[in-house]
Amino acid sequence: MNKSSDDTPLAQSEVQMRKGLLAYCVLLLLRDGKVYTSELIRALHHAELIVVEGTLYPLLNRLAKDGMLAYEWQESEQGPPRKYYWLTDEGKQLLADLKKVYHTLHTSVTTLEKESSHE
Amino acid sequence: MNEVTKIHLGRQAFTISTTAHHELRDYLDAIKQHVSDESVVDEVELRMVELLAEHGVSGEQVVLPADVTFLKEQLGDPKDFAEDGEAEPVTDAPTDSKRLFRDTDNAMLAGVAAGLANYFGVDVLIIRLLFVIATFAGGWGILIYVVLWLLVPEAKTSSERLQMAGKPVTINSLKEVVERADVKGAARRANNSLAGPVNTLFGAISKIIGICFVVIGSGLLLGLAGGATYAFLKSGVLLQDTAFPVGFKEHLLVYIAAAIAGIISLFIVLFGLSIYRRKWPIHAWITGTLIGLLLIGVAVGGALTADVVPQVRDRYNANVHTTTHTVKPFTTVNLNEIGNNETINYQTSATYSVSLQYYGHPDLSTIKASVSKGVLTINSQQFNWSRNCQALCIPNNYNLVITINSPNSPQVVDQNVGPDNINVPVPPSAPQVQ
């Protein structure tokens, strides 16, 4: 009953698109240095890339496991300790690769859109 | 609603309402089912602390269900925590075996009966009635209940509640619980051995039974209150003239017995109410105190009874006396002037005599036995053993026993047996003389 919109074709596709793009977006946010989880969440929220936070944790966890991200815990004056992430060299490489993939996709999609609008 | 408990999130302590605690624990359990790495859960907990702070809940304040709802909205459905391509995650224990837990969600008292009902798949009312029957059969019901209360753990987490209902612990079943498609529903659906109309019938019958219990219990309480008032008003003379001398222990025993009867009556009323309302009407700790008092009362009362009974018997025996008066020979006995409560015995003996067996120290001068013209006349109409008794008197068990001894079987004149002044045969109770 909550989130019955999950089942609509639109929602299903949207979820898949967001999931596919999320890794790229996270890497983008980390390209300039160390960022902690809550900041990431705030930025992604702001960009309307995530609705709920739950999806982010497994992603960060997997990227870290695969060696794309490094992290460290830091004490914080207000509130609990924070987990800061940054890109490893492999992560930077992945970002560059994903950038190419994204732009290729973007171009393809744009082309498709133009073609169909000509009809 | 008012009950709170402590919870640790990311090593920080929070005060949390029990309702919110249940919800939060279920939520975290569900997340744990979806993630492969415990550290994710730690991170989520830390994030919860942050979110709570942003939401205006700091260390001092109580976390309410609304705050947990807020956390859920922010963090999302437990299944969002699943990594892509991951199949249905591991189950704790593949439980097709049921486990016995106390079901506090459906509890009247501590959830023992509801838990047993889940375990055996029967309606909880049946278990409760068995407990009551066992309680009346020597108090076993209360004892078994208390023991199970102590031994059987409460179903705290969603997994435990599912195990209690005999449902497998899977992501979907957990989700069902977490989404508050609620456990009661899940558990009830799981052991739906009694179909709808039967349950309705049970409901109607249980209401009637409940009302009966309330009426019976209230009647007993009123009776006890009346008795106590009477005892208070008559406290000066009460028990003084009873059949045996009464000491401190006997008094105490009466009070304890009255208190036990009072508590049991109260429980009958409460039980009736609880059947009617499907909820135990008073706090568990008050119930516990009452049960404690009841057990103490039974123990002390039992010990006192064991102590007092032989003493009372000895004192009674020591107070039974017999006197024998020799009289002139007689051939006829006139019983027309005997009182109402005397027992007459006939015995064969070498001499003519009358024996009186009595209890305590009555005034025997009121009893006259004389022989004139061969007729023995016994007059005991002036004798009244209990003439001083004003309150609680039980004289009939201790009436005067008159034994008439003679060598030959006498003829008896008794207006209750035959016409006036006509000799009648010896009554069957008298022994025949050889």
Image (cartoon, rainbow, N blue to C red):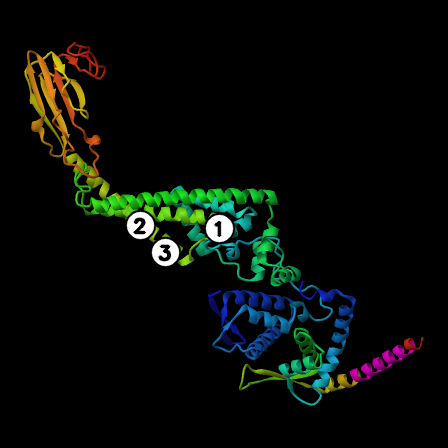
Where B94 sits versus B29, above or below?
A: above
Report the chain holding disc 3.
B
Q: Please name the residue that numbered disc 2 is placed on.
A: B297
Q: Label 1 amino acid?
A: Arg
Where B343 sits versus A57, above or below?
A: above
Q: Nearer the viewer, residue B272 or A92?
A: B272
Q: Is residue A1 left or right of residue B237?
A: right
Badge 1 and badge 3 in a common chain: yes
Q: Please name the residue that numbered disc 1 is placed on.
A: B277
Q: Label 2 amino acid?
A: Gly
Tell me whether the residue at label 3 lies in contact with that at label 2, contact meaning CB atoms closer than 8 angstroms.
no
Q: Is residue A100 magenta?
A: yes
Which badge, 1 or 2, comes first in the chain's sequence?
Answer: 1
Extent of the magenta region? A98-115
Residue B84 in the image: x percent, y percent?
A: 72, 70
Report the chain holding disc 1.
B
